[in-house]
Image (cartoon, rainbow, N blue to C red):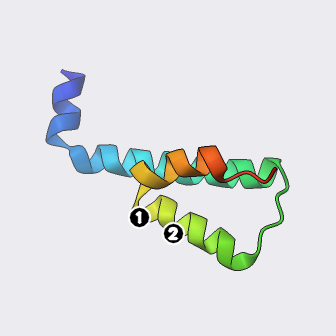
Amino acid sequence: MLVDLFVQHWVSFHGFVTVLALGIYLTASRSLRQRRHPSAGIAWFLSLALLPYVALPLYLLIGNRK
């Protein structure tokens, strides 16, 4: 039943994934006190907002500074 609800309301699921991705970005950047160039921060934020299924794995793999 829960799966049918998500299938019928995929926009809600997409919104959930987008909010989750943005939350991970904001939490990671605040908790790790990362100092990014403003354009890099805006680029990550927009990519997570517009393409969360692609940008979230990329951010988790290469988003943190070494």
Give the structural element (helix, strand or loop) at label 2: helix
- Residue at image location 72% in from the left, 48% down from the top: 28
- Residue at image location 52% in from the left, 45% down from the top: 57
- Residue at image location 66% in from the left, 53% down from the top: 63
CA gap, disc 2 and disc 1: 6 Å
**Residue located beneath label 2 in the image:** 46
The amino acid beneath tag 2 is Leu
Classify 43 as above or below 22: below
Comparing 32 with 61, the one in front is 61
Q: Residue furthest bottom?
A: 39
Quarter where residue 7 is shown: top left
Residue 17: x %, y % from top left:
42, 45
The amino acid beneath tag 1 is Leu
Categorize mark 1 by other alpha carbons within 10 Å: few (<14), some (14-19), many (20+). Answer: few
Comparing 31 with 41, the one in front is 41
Classify 23 as above or below 42: above
Classify 5 as above or below 37: above
Horizontal side, residue 52 vs residue 62: left or right: left
- Residue at image location 67% in from the left, 72% down from the top: 40
Classify 37 as above or below 34: below
**Residue located beneath label 1 in the image:** 50
